[in-house]
Amino acid sequence: MADAPHANALVARLLPSSDRSALQVRAPPHYDVVQGPVARVPSRFRAAPLRSQRPTFTTHASRRGAMVEPGPQTTTSGQEVAVTCVLFAGVRDAVGTDRIELTLPAGSTVRQLRERLLRAYPRAAALLRVSRLAVDADFVDDDAELRDGVEVAVIPPVSGGAGETRVALTEAPIDPAEWLAAVYTPAAGAVVTFLGTVREFTGERRTRELEYEAYREMTERKLREIGDAARVRFGLTGVVIVHRLGLLKIGEISVFIAVSSPHRAQAFDGCRFIIEAIKKDVPIWKKEIWADGSYEWVHPGMESSGGTT
């Protein structure tokens, strides 16, 4: 139907003026007539606004029952890195899967990944602590930074791998039972351990706590060198060296050493060699914090460097 203005113009041309009023075309009261470039549409004819589309989330595909984290099928942001952990042998059985997919904050290291796995899978802790980690099929140190999308293989001690030296620096309490598995081998007839603990008195002075500080990069390398030297010199079949850092209370373990060998004499001699070499050559410093709040750094052969807390 033509709009009202055009219809009335047609009537004016065809009929005399006396007959026009009866045929004036008027718009129905419930319609808005287009009068210009902008039209008003009655509410009952207006389309409903489009609803905002919600993002779709999908669980990552997994292989052989991998443990995965659900999330959108997008790459990680610059603040996270995606890591796939591949597990073997006893570690796989203790965890219950051969593959774990997870995300870590950008800049995370292999050490931080290991610590996360230890918290998440305590049943596998003994093996996780002594396993070597390989990033994209290459063994790396615990200080290596993880890149987005890497595959990390958790390699427990392998058959024929006896004699390897395991070292660790930690700010968490040391549990000897978690580390002993690393030195048990079929070739071992003796296992000797040494535990250094925080004593309450040094001479007549009462200690409140100790603090250990280390040049971490050099310390880990020197500990491994000492362990390797002991293996060769005393014929040891396994060596573990773990040292605490940070604040320690009275009675806590500061250093744990475990060695194994075919005979007890070799194990005793090797263990003593390791602790003496650590005291001499490894850059770890001890601060005695006394009961009265004063403290001093222990530098053998020199005057103490102290103060108050």
Image (cartoon, grey):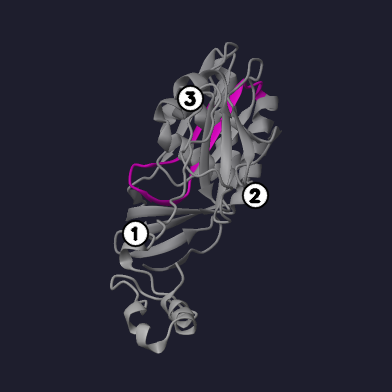
3D distance between C-alphas at marks 1 and 3: 33 Å
Position in image of residue 36 (x %, y %)? 47, 82
Give the residue number, with chain letter if any, for mark 1: 290
Which residue appears at 46% of the width and 22% of the height? 96
What SS does tag 2 mark? helix
Q: Quadrant of residue 205?
A: bottom left
- Which three-letter amino acid code belongs to the residue tagged 2? Met
Give the alpha-carbon distance from disc 3 to disc 2, as whole Å: 25 Å
Does any portion of residue 255 appear in the rendered image? no
Residue 218, numbered circle = 2
Left or right: residue 206 versus residue 182 is: left
Dot placed on the residue nearer the N-terminal end, 1 or 3 = 3
Q: Nearer the viewer, residue 269 or 163?
A: 163
The magenta segment is 234-258
Residue type pointed to by label 3? Leu
Marks 3 and 2 close (CB-CB < 8 Å): no
Q: Amino acid at mark 1?
A: Trp
Please give the name of the residue rendered at 43% of the width and 51% of the height, measured from the top-left corner: 54
